[in-house]
Image: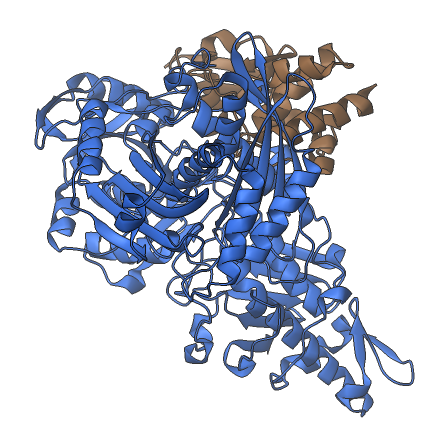
Amino acid sequence: MPTFNLKINNETHTVEADMDTPLLWVLRDQIDLVGTKFGCGIGQCGACTVHVDGNAMRSCLLQVSQAEGMNITTIEGLSEDGTHPVQEAWKEIDVPQCGYCQSGQIMTASAFLSKNPNPSDSQIRNAMHGNICRCASYNSIEEAVKVAADKLS
Amino acid sequence: MTPSKTMTFSRRSFLKSSALASGGILIGFNLFNACKPDAKVPVDISQLNFNDFNAFIKISDEGKVTIFSPNPEIGQGVKTSMPMLIAEELDVAWDDVYVEQGVLDTNNYTRQVAGGSQSIRFSWEPLRQTGATAKQMLVNAAAAKWGVDASECTAKLGVITNANGDTLGYGDVVKDAAGMEVPENVSLKDPKDFTIIGKATGNVDIDKIITGKPLFGLDYKEEGMVYASVLRPPAFGQVLDTFDASAAKALPGVIDVIVIGEKARKFLDKGFISWTSVISGTDKVVVVAKTTWDAIKGKKAIKATWKNDTPLESTENHDKILFDLLDGDKFDTQRSDGDVKKAFAQADKVIERTYEAPFLPHNCMEPMNFFANVTPEKVHLVGPIQTPEETAKVAAALLDRELEDIEVEMTRMGGGFGRRLYCDFVIEAAEISNAINKPVKMISTREDDMGTGVYRPSTKYRIAASIKDGKLTGYHLKEACVNGNMYGLIPNFFPAAAVENYKVDTTNYKSNITTGAWRAPYTNFLASAEQTFFDELAEEMGVDRIQLHLDLLENVKNNPDPKIEYSPERLQGVIKLAVEKSNWGKSEAGVYQGFSVYYCHNSHVAEVADIVMDNGTPTVKKVTCVVDCGIVVNPMGALNQVKGGVIDGIGHTMYSDFGFNNGIPLSKNFDTYQLIRMGQTPKVDVHFIENELAPTGLGEPTLPPVGAAVANAIYKATGKRLTKQPYMSNMNVGEKVIG
């Protein structure tokens, strides 16, 4: 099996995997970074969202062979101690219900706000439209993104 | 009404304490069967012994409190709200309280509990009693130390004070308290004095969730664990015929390919074991692999053929069958008052409408999965399941083991919605581990999860009402449903007791498609049907829609009936506040309002939906939701529940469509199945009725009414009465949406 060097949360990990293995499963099963969640496997739900060179990407669609050489950030590496403004906003608003989709929501929101720190309401709704929350915590997610934007600006 | 008065329990039998070697005191108590969906109150706690304890309070020498709660978290906030009840009566600062998931050990603690809408309702008294008793033990210990009477001492925020003004912290007296007798007859706080209950309190797992710590079943790992993916029949009605695993076995990550099913068949031959065991008796091909991806890839490489075991069913047939049942005369009568037939014969006008709803998958964001390690010594099962006790029973029967051998641990659950009441996936994991003699994690893909589910059954309601001299004189509801029918007191929900001639009839068709509980079972669609019907009925009668309800509820006040659970006063209360808060009837131009009110899961809810039309497509802009659920234990969690229920309800009544073609589910993933997303989401404006009544359910009751509020608003905008869900696929009120 081929070997890949992955730069994840500023650390290099060497993993053996089939070339077509989605980054999601390498993170979860081999590197023990289980904060990135499996929801659909086809890039529809956003639970597996990570940052690749600062952009939000679906780790279920990114093959491990494509991920080499890129700067990958997962929820575990978003901040050292859970104090990224988006994480703080999520805590302040108490967004999660079951909580399963929330790391993906946070990763989408943080990548979006890093590019657009002063978004309009409709920009927020568009940016978060790709992430499903089955508990439907959407009102709280929307509010938390606004709170995070205030913290960032 | 259920007043929040104290019930009398013998505390000696349900609480015990012991000193800890590491310092501090450990108080064991029981969270009862109380939180089971089928629990009855009051639970006979006098029958419990120490082995029945399944939850603990630890108070350290420093006075820090840890509450070990075995209650699993599905997302409805009970892991936070239930410990709040204990902490309130124990009288400690919430900041000094830690909540930990209790270790679950079926050998010693057989009464494990799982949350649901009824958790808070059933635990309200017992958990407060527990906290109050623990506090009294500490006070008694302090009084003994001072040589004064305990009645002269008070305790507040972890500090005990005597008449002289001397103080001792809880931590100072824990050692003494551990040796003391458990006091009887403690008193509970007056709700006016609550400092924790009623205060917005954040989710106790929040830090772990926002930093991605392992919490869920899918995150659980053990040394030497392998992964398994199960190939199940693609269509309901089919069983495995032949398979070729050579390509799968050639993959480097695949360890083995096995077949399971024999144990499940033997289990089924034993007859009924548990309502949770929706197990199929077909052979299934299992790919065992080093990683999840290897297992998924291996499964794709299996070449299998299937044969028809029972007829393959389609939505088209179901529709015809259910209509034929409604047209027929074979019904079970669930409630009958007066003479509906006579009322209809004498009426000036009779209106009749039929309402339709599809099957629905649960689609928990965390797909079904479970860890199993079957060894000669014990059977260790870990993962997201709401019914651990039933699951242990089923696992014991399946594997022919003693119940004492089975240990079920619950993890946090990535959603439930009813799906995790059923243990089919746990049983598969157990059969796999038993076959391969290894610890294994069985993981479903989304396609497995949506395509081999336990669905909300497809249902049709036909409702007829008679009008005489401008009054509603008769009401007849018929239910035709796949596999089951409304149960319990549902036939006695509003408008039972409000209409003189009233009848509820049910009938069903037995299908080979697996069905079961789905968030707010039956009422999730029944409320839509009835409250859409009432809107049209009021129009036909030429009366105000709100006034019609208020008047009918007046009738109920004069018609006492032990089977009527709902309170006409509380329903009137939510209606009036919803009218006020929503600006009912005064909406701005272009905004159309729809009203709905419903009672279920012991809570009373009224909702008003505001919609606008964008290029002929309705969008819900706002929902005003008024809830009477008694005392709101945790307003922060309660708001989440209410808003989530409303938006979930809108999603499933407007967008989510599902069905079968020759036994094959029409959708298996989110590219063809629509769950509501941010852009379709209204603002939910929530108002709670303030009272001091005992708390009732919140996880379910805000969902059922919203479908009708939306349908009634769309009627005002378009003139179309919506009778078939999901509205966007069936009612020609805009484009069907995916994504």
Q: In the picture provided, is A18 more to the left or to the right than B507?
A: right
Q: Is residue B645 above or below residue B266?
A: above
Q: In the picture provided, is B714 more to the left or to the right than B204?
A: left
Q: In the picture provided, is B59 more to the left or to the right than B311?
A: right
Question: In this orientation, does residue B550 appear?
Answer: yes
Report the quarter where the C terminus of chain A lies.
top right
> Which residue is outermost to the right?
B164
Counting the numbered discs, the total is 0
The figure's colour scheme reads by chain
Measuring from the top left, give residue B701's x and y in whole percent.
51, 45
Report the quarter where the N terminus of chain A lies.
top left
**Residue at figure coordinates x 72%, y 83% from the top left:** B141
Question: In this orientation, does residue A37 appear?
Answer: no
Q: Is residue A61 above or below residue B470?
A: above
Which of these two is toward me, B439 or B603?
Answer: B603
Chain ID for brown: A
Which of these two is toward me, B446 or B427?
Answer: B446
Q: In the picture provided, is B379 more to the left or to the right than B364?
A: left
Q: Is residue A24 above or below residue B221?
A: above
**Residue at figure coordinates x 62%, y 59% from the top left:** B83
Measuring from the top left, give residue B379's x and y in whole percent.
30, 53
In which quadrant of the rendered view does residue A96 lie?
top right
**Residue at figure coordinates x 71%, y 55% from the top left:** B198
Visual hue assigned to chain B: blue
Measuring from the top left, give residue B242's x and y in whole percent.
8, 24
Which of these two is toward me, B591 or B599?
Answer: B591
Measuring from the top left, give residue B170's x and y in whole percent.
75, 72
